[in-house]
Image: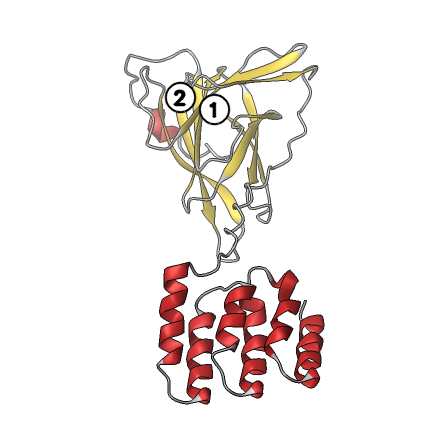
């Protein structure tokens, strides 16, 4: 069905330079990554945005399966004969994956040309060769030297499961301010004349940096009033890289009530 209506493309005289087998290219208009399978054999081990498969026998019917790497877009299945519809000679057929308004993807005809030798692939195009060996195994390889072998296929379809994209590496663990940065922070906090201003400045600094327990204790000791020490100790808890030992901060308080309030806060926010 994909090639119906394109007979005029090959109704003119044919030129020389034909290869003996056809080629099929599939690319995504929107840059979607996908796996291409032909007759149950996956052509690319990693998801690609453009795949070209050569070595397709003349008049061979190809059952095409497109599986998307996002695991959300519905797969596409089509059947097509990759050959000149006039004389059945080898061709290069190009199909395109497009997105419809509802977000679904579909496979449409893009172009078809006589198969020429010495094909120059497009930038980023993955090259594969369809094996003609359908016995105890199916082999396929690509021109970059990669070779995959499916053992014991017995000519049947291969179960294809899209592989999810690798998870991004975890973000680096936060680190407390180094000695020079912390010394500058302490000086900035001390430049404030009033306790409330010191507290506001300290929160601003710690909101953009991380500290360790010893640094929290040093900043708490910059405040004259117990309530400001407690307010800062609570604020700094979630910005402390080693808060498993946060009980040490209790030593800055003069009253048991302040220690208990901090203990309760830590228990509720672990």
The quadrant of the rendering that contains the C terminus is bottom right
Q: Which mark is residue 91?
A: 2
Front residue (pair 162, 10):
162
- Of mark 2 and mark 1, the one earlier in the sequence is 1
**Residue at image point 58% right, 70% down:** 237
Q: Which mark is residue 82?
A: 1
Q: For the residue carrying disc 2, how many other residues have a C-alpha within 10 Å: few (<14), some (14-19), or many (20+)?
A: many
Residue 206 at x, y percent in the picture? 46, 71
- The correct choice, above or below, for 226 with respect to 263 in the image is below
Question: Which x, y percent locates residue 137?
Answer: 65, 13
Residue in the image at 39% along x and 30% along y: 125
**Residue in view at x 37 percent, y 84 percent:** 192
Horizontal relation, residue 35 to residue 150: left or right: left
Considering depth in this image, is 54 or 46 the residue closer to the camera?
Answer: 46
- Image quadrant where residue 84 sits: top left
- Compared across the picture, whether 113 is left or right of 237 comes to left
């Amino acid at each position: 069905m994909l090639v119906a209506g394109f007979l005029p493309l090959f109704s003119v005289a044919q030129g020389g330079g034909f290869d003996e087998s056809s080629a099929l290219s599939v690319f995504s208009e929107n840059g979607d990554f996908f796996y291409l399978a032909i007759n149950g054999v996956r052509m690319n081990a990693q998801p690609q945005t453009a795949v070209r498969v050569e070595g397709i026998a003349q008049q061979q019917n190809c059952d095409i399966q497109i599986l998307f790497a996002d695991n959300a877009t519905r797969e596409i299945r089509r059947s097509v004969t990759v050959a000149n519809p006039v004389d059945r000679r080898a061709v290069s057929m190009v199909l395109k994956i497009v997105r419809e308004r509802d977000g679904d993807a579909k496979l449409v005809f893009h172009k078809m040309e006589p198969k020429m030798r010495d094909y120059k692939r497009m930038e980023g195009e993955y090259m594969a060769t369809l094996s003609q060996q359908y016995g105890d195994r199916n082999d396929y390889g690509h021109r970059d030297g990669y070779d995959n072998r499916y053992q014991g296929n017995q000519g049947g379809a291969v179960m294809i499961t899209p592989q999810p994209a690798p998870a991004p590496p975890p973000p680096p663990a936060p680190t407390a301010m180094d000695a020079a940065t912390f010394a500058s922070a302490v000086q900035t906090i001390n430049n404030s004349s009033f306790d409330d201003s010191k507290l506001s400045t300290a929160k601003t600094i710690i909101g953009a940096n991380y500290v360790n327990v010893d640094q929290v204790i040093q900043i708490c000791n910059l405040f004259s009033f117990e309530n400001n020490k407690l307010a800062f100790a609570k604020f700094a808890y979630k910005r402390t890289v080693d808060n498993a030992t946060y009980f040490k901060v209790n030593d800055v308080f003069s009253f048991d009530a302040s220690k208990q309030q901090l203990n309760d806060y830590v228990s509720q926010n672990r």
